[in-house]
Amino acid sequence: MLIAQSGGPTCAINASVAGAVEEAGRHPELIEEIYGGRNGIYGILRGQLIDLQEERRSAIEGLRYTPAAALGTCRYKIDFKKKPEQAARDMDRLFEVFRDFNIRYFFYAGGNDSQDTSLKIHEEALKRGWEMRVIGIPKTIDNDLPHTDHCPGYGSVIKYNATTVMEVGMDVASMATDEGAVCIIEVMGRSAGWIAAGTALAKRGNPAAPPHIILLPELVFEPAPFLARVRETVAALGYCIVVVGEGIKWKVKRPGNGGEQEVLEEVGADPTRVDAFGHKYLAGAALKLKDLVEAELRTKTRTVLLGYAQRAAAHCASATDIENAVACGQAAVRAALNGQSGYMVKITREYWEDDAGRRHLRWGTALHDLREVANVEHFVPRDWLTEDGMMVNEKFLEYAAPLIEGEVRAPVENGLPKYVVLEGVPAAKKTAESAEPDPEALSPETAPPAA
Amino acid sequence: MLIAQSGGPTCAINASVAGAVEEAGRHPELIEEIYGGRNGIYGILRGQLIDLQEERRSAIEGLRYTPAAALGTCRYKIDFKKKPEQAARDMDRLFEVFRDFNIRYFFYAGGNDSQDTSLKIHEEALKRGWEMRVIGIPKTIDNDLPHTDHCPGYGSVIKYNATTVMEVGMDVASMATDEGAVCIIEVMGRSAGWIAAGTALAKRGNPAAPPHIILLPELVFEPAPFLARVRETVAALGYCIVVVGEGIKWKVKRPGNGGEQEVLEEVGADPTRVDAFGHKYLAGAALKLKDLVEAELRTKTRTVLLGYAQRAAAHCASATDIENAVACGQAAVRAALNGQSGYMVKITREYWEDDAGRRHLRWGTALHDLREVANVEHFVPRDWLTEDGMMVNEKFLEYAAPLIEGEVRAPVENGLPKYVVLEGVPAAKKTAESAEPDPEALSPETAPPAA
């Protein structure tokens, strides 16, 4: 089997690898070798596979609490639409590698793009008659994959971000005297606002508690009602904490064909300049909002830009998130051994009542056809937000609250967390010819389901 | 007694209040009432005192792990130089409040400015013949107070920042393929670089581990050697993590009297604009360095701006820091009861060897004359840095390593830390006339030391 990671790292993506490797280890009669692909497809195309059975058992266990992508990750996409020739060459090379290492089970952990890659590899395997089961494992802090209850990585990022909002809120509140103070915290989320929305858990049901305003990329940003709300909040509480998803957009007038036109543009974009790569320059939404608030309200405003820190914050990970990530890895291996291919594992939630009438939540996993997952983005439903769109309502809170339950305690050495680094012993080639698997041994049901 | 907090909050400043209040509670025969001043001098001038004996005992205990300033804080300064009339009025009003509430012990926790305020109040008390002992309690994440081994708040901020550098470093490393990646993390520190320096603990002695470059405000920033080092690091490791103190400055040419002149200017300043308050516009050092790196090296660069999050991160506090902060509060009260006034508590470290020859560290406290503390800034010694000034050496690491030892576990509720909020019952006035203390009971030695 081969497992690899793709897209932006999270502090739960390694937990899925741990779950998959441990589950695979329970079936030595079916899975002889367990390989990891370095830097996702990017490294696999270069034949960079490592032998995960050479890793210490404690290292695999330690992946549960280790942030980032222990196997390495990439943003490489096999793009048949834009680069059909390159994509065809990549597929040939990929299946060469699969043959070289006799890969019969392939697991790819990632977000939307990665699920698309998994689907394409599954379809190619069918087309080429290469007997291999392909299962996608969900992962993205953005929480924008469809059909799954949530995405591994999301629970941890909002636990950390809500903790930060709570702490920064106390800090700013304790400094607020008559002058008032505003703090704008920019969080990730280019098109979906799940991360910004999740910080509302810091309120704990107290309307006066921070965050006081959240701005999601799903809604067009309108300065006037935003500024009015900041003003009201500072007047009432002496301070205001704003959480903004990095990708919020507003309508601005820009020169276009036939004169000035109204376009939708990132609030954080600086239209007067381009970056070193010739792209639109992004100074950041928080910085722009700070300028707006200071200019209009004359209230001192500070910014926080959590950036990569939020998705790597394993020291503040959610145990629920990590457990579900492990379960996704395990379920992927079990599904493949069961003969399934072309699916993504999804997380399910079920509420049940005990004899005393107490409500409990049971997490589970199921499979979903990759064709309905790949390249589909899932947004925060409009009716999970307040009417003005600047806060979530009870529906969102009921959804999100269980995702941050439980703490993960990584071992500590000299006051800092002790994370795992894999040895990364290169895998030896082992072609189907050199080690023809017993067809009977592959798994009980060898026919993959119709794609 | 009256205790108050001043300056930027930290996640250890409340621990000093807990230490002081608990110590005072052990001497009910000497200290009848324990008051807290709201928002430091700012609130005390307005008579905003709260009765800390009305707080639940668990709340006072909980201050140990609660970030921000539970009593509120301020940046208000009694400035006899710039505003002599206002300062004189403020002093009159302060002593009116001291009389109204019969304050005989005054404790002020804060940084350089606050120690200066403590000194002035001590001198005024002597001048006015108001029998009162004044002791300053050190606090500042900047760690720039002189004479004390370190400042409460500093250990926690570098524990959190080093953890963040470690996590972000793993994240960026796991994404680095042939293109290379740079991440610039901006930390606090306008003039002293202790915070940036402290993130070097994340290296754990591994030269290849992040941070790869640290930039301190003590040294003039020079772009050429910096860019060369970034280039080398990316070439060797595929990525580079830079930590920059927010206040770094460089030499730039600006129009002045008699033509262009070379001036020292914040790297993060944008000389083409002013902010809403007419001050120099600061977009931030990290953003400027990102532009430099992308323009010169054409390497994708992301930024992290921890801002207030770093000084409020009680969820990642250092137990050593918190214990020393508690000890400072306790020592302040004991010193005052001993008849001392006009001092700041300082933290001392002593190494000793046990019978087996093992080296141990013993923390302690002592007093230092406020006149030698007030308005003196303590910088990172040049010989604690490498020759090129872009990394610390063993001397710094030996100093800083013990400061981040030990974890503080705040109680957790629904996945988020449960911090304390004080009830804040207003204190009732209790003048010296209405409750003249028994002079014998004040304390064994009533004469304050000569100021």
Image (cartoon, coloured by chain):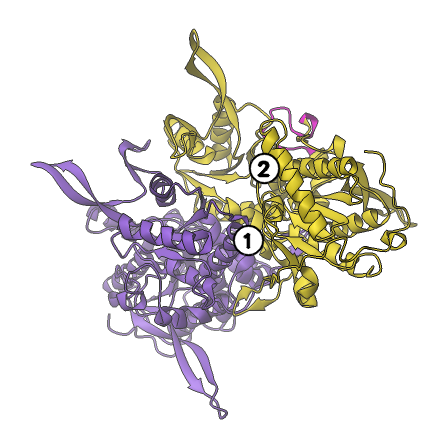
Chain colours: A purple, B yellow
Residue depicted at 32% across the width and 52% down the height: A228
In the image, B70 versus B247, the foreground residue is B70
Main SS of the magenta segment?
A: loop
In the image, B375 versus A22, the foreground residue is B375
| Mark 1 on the same chain as mark 2 | no
**Dot 1: element:** loop
Residue type indicated by callout 2: Ala
Residue bearing the label numbered 2: B196
Chain of the residue under the numbered disc 1 shown in the image: A
Residue bearing the label numbered 1: A422
Image quadrant occupied by the C terminus of chain A: bottom left
In the image, A175 versus B89, the foreground residue is B89
Number of marks in picture = 2
Is B83 drawn above or below residue A46 in the view shown? Answer: above
Q: Quadrant of residue A219?
A: bottom left
First to last magenta residue range? B382-394
Residue that extends furthest to the top in the rendered view of this protein: B258
